[in-house]
Image (cartoon, rainbow, N blue to C red):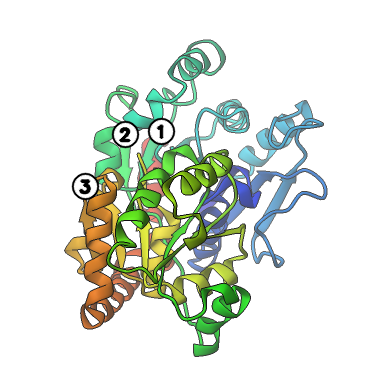
Amino acid sequence: MRILHVVPSLHPATGGPARSVPALVQAEHEAGMEATLATFHAAGAPWTLETEAAYAVHELRPAWGTRQRPTQQARSTLESLARDHDLVHLHSVWNPAITAAASAARSARRPYMLTPRGMLQRRSMAHRRLAKWLYRRAIDPHTLTRASLIHYFTQAERDDSRPTHPEGVASAVVPNGTPPVHLSFGGRLRFRQRHPRLRDDPFILFAGRLHWSKGLAIQLQALKELLKTWPQVRWVMAGPDGGDGAGLRRLARDLGVASRVVWTGPLSRQELLETYAAASAFVLTSIHEAHSMDMNEALAVGVPIVATRTVRFDEIQEWGAGHVVAWDGQSVASALGQILADPERAAAMRRAGQAAAARELAWPVIARRLERVYESVLAGAA
């Protein structure tokens, strides 16, 4: 089975897909599929492939001055690649690179499936609603409607995307994955060594883009509330600026918590894993979320998690790996206070999260489940 994966970019600033898509392709390669990755990569730009991949990677050069706008040469390359594969798996939507890849698959008469990664959910569709309506009507009316299948990460994502899901197109639910994590005790100490101002203070972690969709104002409000009973606690914001960085720093100053926040900027995957390992808890407050790669890695490392109901991943609580709470600072602070006050319960959450990640979310498990989805798509196409 020959699968061509297309992701618009592997630039670290693009967030979870830049890590999860290469990991998926690697898992499919190890499972015996002929998995290939195509992505747009400007010469000299950073990307998440830190070592030479075991599978084929095709770097498409974007138009000058852009990160992922396809040239005519890139379109021709995508069509040629599509002809050489049985199925095309697209990772994103509302994107010129994905529009070009879907068009190439249709020209090559190859079926394609699409993973929207939360971009069809109600909250996402409401953001820049007019621009998305125009894109779908005037620029790209066919990518969704002519897909063979749309792949959602969770049932909640599928349910929430129902108003935008095109009529007559099949769907499937397979979670996002995570690799196993093995950290030495020294690895758990290195984050504090890089940030000596933390000393031995407990800290709460957010990892991801500083972006409007992550609901990070709620986290700063939670910090202000938590400091009333845990004055030594700190909050670490780990990740690239997705457009909200300056506003969040102003809010931290206005709330009087700026001195308790550490802003790390982008981290390598190893640095991020060491950050998880040192954290007292991981918090996710996204306004909408398909299935967070950062949350999966936190589970794999073994970090108690507090997620708001807007994340729509109740499995965290069902697995015993953390709390699912209302989307407000008081509720988040209360759940974190319970974790900080009960080390034995926190340790049990760590173990439960690691067990669930290995059982439900390990990449070999996800690759096999997606292989069955691919088989069903190809059977339908035949």
Q: Which residue is mark 2?
A: 170
Q: Position of residue 61 (x, y in %)?
A: 77, 39
Packing grade of label 2 (10 A; few <14, some 14-19, many >=20) is: some
Q: Is residue 343 above or below residue 262?
A: below
Mark in front: 3 vs 2: 3
Q: Secondary structure at mark 1?
A: loop
Q: Amino acid at mark 3?
A: Ala
Which one is in front, 271 or 353? 271
Mark in front: 3 vs 1: 3
Q: Residue at x 71, y 49 (%)?
A: 58
**Looking at this view, is 86 or 227 the one in front?**
227
Pointer 1: what residue? 148
User: Residue 382, percent across and down?
Assistant: 42, 37
Q: If you read the primary sequence from the N terminus, does the residue marked by circle 1 or circle 2 appear first?
A: 1
- Pointer 3 or 1: first along the chain: 1
Q: Which mark is residue 326?
A: 3
Is residue 313 visible in the rendered image? The answer is no
Q: Is residue 196 visible?
A: yes
In the image, what residue occupies the spot 48% across and 82% down?
Answer: 182
| Amino acid type, mark 1 | Ser
- Asked if disc 1 and disc 2 are in contact, CB closer than 8 Å, the reply is yes
Task: Report helix, strand or loop for mark 3.
Answer: loop
In this picture, residue 358 sits left or right of residue 338: right
Q: Give how far apart the Cα atoms at labels 3 and 1 are.
A: 37 Å
Label 1 packing within 10 angstroms: few (<14), some (14-19), many (20+)? many
Q: Quadrant of residue 193?
A: bottom right
Tell me where residue 259 appears, x and y as whole percent: 51, 60
Instruction: Indicate the quadrant where residue 195 lies.
Output: bottom right
- Position of residue 45 in the picture relative to residue 114 (left or right): right
